[in-house]
Image: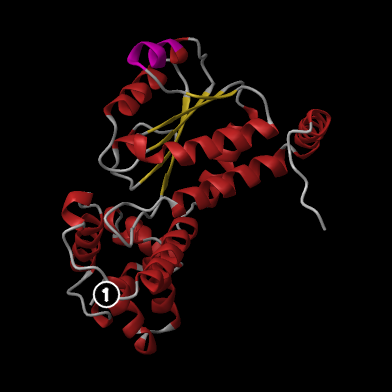
Amino acid sequence: MTVSEQVVAARSELSPAEARVAAQVLAAPSRVAFGTVAELARRAGTGTATVVRFTTKAGYRGFADLQASVRAEMSESLRPAAERIREPAARDLVDLTLHAELDNVRATLQGVDREAFAQAVRLLARSRRVLIAAGEASAGVARVLRDHLSMLRPAVELVRGSPVRVVSDLATARDGDLLVALDLRRYDRWVLDALDQAKRSGLHVVALTDGPLSPLARRATVAFTVAAEGSGPFDSHVGELALVNALVAGVAARLRAAAAGRLDAIESAWAAASVLAQSRP
């Protein structure tokens, strides 16, 4: 059985405190994979002894055994597409995809630290300039972030192109500007180079990546873990997009008056230019 299946199977035997530990394991497995007993106990509002009792009831030989199982599952989910495509396909791919994407969104958003989220929203709303760099696989999500943020505030740019272009774009950034980085394992090297340049220049960095041990997370001011389990050979970016939607909603709420005026101006320009076709009743 998977870790989540073992935890769910043990629920009827858990005390209320142990059930809170179980909820934390299900909500944020990456924190279990790279955290400590004390951290898990703190998030569950209980003690380390309760965590140990929970792991035993869930069928593990202690926290280290649970942690190893979570890490093994994460490693399995991050295998290259060239390996995954050789596996037999599930009979009902629609149902498999439904559950995989629901799990991705749930794990990503339930694992968000609220203080880190508030800090990221503040940086996205208040930084003089927001630069966005994404690996090739996350480029579509990065464009959504750029397009939506640009409708709420000025000075939002994608960083892409040749190494000369990337270095030039970052060279004009100033101390206190923001770089948002999105990428999953295996990471585009140019994104890591851009992060290094950004840190040397004093930029804040918000990273959306696949775990706290990601090289993006280690270079970030604020880092978020996104679940990316795919139902086919490729990683899913649905959880990543859900987190981007939450961040944009946070910026909209923070900049409500200014953002409303900016959106009104955009809507007026669209109407004047007749660039959108209206649906007929």
Residue 198 falls in image quadrant: top left
Numbered-mark total: 1
- Residue 122 can be seen in this image: no
85 and 120: which is toward the camera: 85
98 and 134: which is toward the camera: 98
Q: Dot 1, how many residues are within 10 Å of its Cα: few (below 14), some (14-19), or many (20+)?
A: many
The vertical placement of 219 against 66, above or below, is above
- Residue drawn at x 20%, y 52% as measured from the top left: 79
The vertical placement of 90 against 130, above or below, is below
Check the picture and name the quadrant holding the C terminus. bottom right
The vertical placement of 132 against 176, above or below, is below
219 with respect to 176 (left or right): left
221 with respect to 177 (left or right): left
Q: Which residues are magenta?
A: 162-168
Residue 266 on image: x %, y %: 76, 31
Residue furthest to the front in view is 280
Residue 211 on image: x %, y %: 33, 48
Please, what is the three-letter code of the amino acid marked with disc 1?
A: Thr
208 and 118: which is toward the camera: 208
The vertical placement of 26 against 125, above or below, is below
Residue 196 on image: x %, y %: 34, 22
Check the picture and name the quadrant holding the N terminus. bottom left
243 and 53: which is toward the camera: 243
Q: Which residue is mark 1?
A: 55
Residue 92 falls in image quadrant: bottom left
- Residue 119 can be seen in this image: yes
Secondary structure found at label 1: helix
